[in-house]
Amino acid sequence: MSNFTSSSEFLLLEFSDIRELHLLHFFVFLAVYLTAVTGNLLIIIAVAHDYHLHTPMYFFLVNLAVLDLGSVSVTVPKAMANSLINSRSISYFGCAAQVFFYPLFGGSDLAFLTIMAHDRYVAICNPLQYETIMHKGACIQMAVSAWISGIVYGTLHTGGTFSITFCSNIINQFFCEIPQLLKLSCSDLYLVEIGLLVLSAIVALGCFIFIVLTYKEILATVLRIPSVQGQKKALSTCLPHLTVVSLLVFTGMFAYVKPPAKTSSDLDILFAVLYAILPPLLNPFIYSMRNKEIKTALLKLFNSGHSSSTNRTLP
């Protein structure tokens, strides 16, 4: 397509030619989206409502929940709308927004997961210095740094991606994914974005190595705890976090580390669904819902809401 301008639109992947399957995709995505939004909102409300959870660990967890809300809201609603109205289109600026916000939330997400690994390291390996190291000012500085890094990350990728000339407007993905957009390039400027992707992969690998080495130290410390119950309590706050990190890094690497190919595959779509939707969906469950403190806070929240409702109905 020549003279592809900002007034044009892109065509996203169509899951099926059958109208009934379009509706099925809509309801599946709707259920997933509502579950992800509800789970992450419950975490935010529970932590805000219970002052016992006003600690660094849950402060970072709230930020992670906000990022998950943003991440799943970037891709899923548009896919739902297209399935419902039987459309494939997304505007040029809508595509640019997805390219900006998804790396923003994804980059900040990885930054917070790295910070949370450091938080667990200090809590388990240096418990006596925890309040000194993880004080309020330090936590706010780390959180601001994570958000700023995400904004810079998203800005660089948006500029690198949309500086190229597109020869086609057909994207073989259900959202505007950078590797798929690079396949549409008919200029050498796409090499700039590939360079950014390689740099991103190196940074992500560095974060992952830092997390692995951190957990190596944590595991060594946990094994020295004489009480089996104490070991289980310490590990219970670490294993879900490591699971989320592994899921995010390994599924993301499939899409962003491999060199762009001219053809798409079902695996591209599958892994895109995995890294774009599963982490925001599963984080509230594997990261928080198994936490006794979160469960207690949610029970208090529901009980207080039920009591308020009962009192309003009483004469």
Image (spheres, helix red, strand yellow):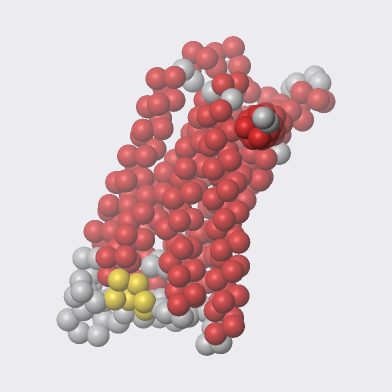
Report the front residue among 132 and 45. 45
Specify the farthest residue to the bottom.
17
Q: Is residue 153 left or right of residue 3?
A: right
Q: Residue at x 59, y 81 (%)?
A: 21
Specify the farthest residue to the right.
228
Q: How many circles with numbers are drawn on the protein? A: 0
Q: Position of residue 62 (x, y in %)?
A: 51, 36
> Can I make out residue 52 in this image?
yes
Q: Residue at x 54, y 50 (%)?
A: 37
Q: Is residue 34 left or right of residue 73?
A: right
Report the front residue among 78 and 57. 78
Q: Position of residue 13 (x, y in %)?
A: 45, 78
Residue 238: name its quadrant: top right
> Can I make out residue 206 in this image?
no
Q: Residue at x 29, y 46 (%)?
A: 152
Residue 228: name its quadrant: top right
Q: Is residue 155 left or right of residue 132?
A: left
Specify the farthest residue to the front.
315
Q: Position of residue 77 (x, y in %)?
A: 46, 63
Q: Position of residue 205 (x, y in %)?
A: 47, 48
Report the front residue among 124 and 301. 301
On-image quarter of the N terminus? bottom left
In the rendered image, the vertical position of residue 253 relative to residue 84, given as above or below: above
Q: Residue at x 47, y 37 (%)?
A: 63
On-image quarter of the C terminus? top right
